[in-house]
Amino acid sequence: MHITRNLKALGASALAAAFLVTGVGTAQAASNHAISGTVYSPCSSAGWAWYNSSTARYKEGTGAMKVIFSDLNKGGLNFKSRDASNLTIGNVVSFAYSETDIWRTQASSVANGRKFYNSFKQVSSACNQKDYNFSGTQSY
């Protein structure tokens, strides 16, 4: 009886070791990806609506999605990611123009391989803000 139990435990350990060595069953880690776009003034022809990117992206590994921006203007930036059904994944994150180089978490647990698209718009509704480009990094 003790021998059978020990053999079962040894077999389970060997199987677990085989998965670790071959990499089967291990999740990939998220990585950083450059993002950029043009934010339109609420008073421009593009209007106050969200700009919805048509670029499909896929989550790498299960875990958090977050963003950081290195270039913003005084109008600020609202940023979100949405799934194929146009539902927001996690939360909309907002950045004032002075909030560059600050990571913000969009969602804490997103499944590996989940398809998504990014959307953004200016925070300020003031008409004195001009269209501008932003750049940053998204970890997914």
Image (cartoon, grey):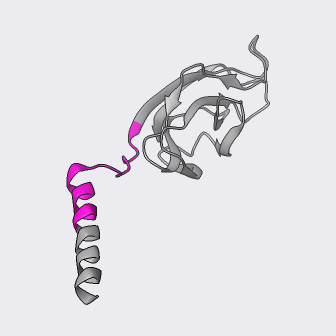
Image-based side of 117 in relation to 63, left or right? right
State yes or no: residue 22 in magenta: yes
How many marks the image carries: the answer is 0
Which of the two residues, 21 or 62, is positioned nearer the viewer here? Answer: 21
Q: Quadrant of residue 115?
A: top right
At a point 79% along the width and 29% down the height, the residue shown is 126
First to last magenta residue range: 14-32
Asked if 90 appears above or below 53 in the picture, the reply is below
Where the N terminus falls, by quadrant?
A: bottom left
Asked if 138 appears above or below 10 in the picture, the reply is above
Pinpoint residue 19: horizontal percent, then vertical percent.
27, 55
Pinpoint residue 128: horizontal percent, then vertical percent.
75, 24
Pinpoint residue 85: horizontal percent, then vertical percent.
71, 30
Which of the two residues, 94 or 140, is positioned nearer the viewer here? Answer: 140
Extreme residue in the front direction: 1
Asked if 10 appears above or below 110 in the picture, the reply is below
Q: Quadrant of residue 73?
A: top right
Image-based side of 115 in relation to 33, left or right? right
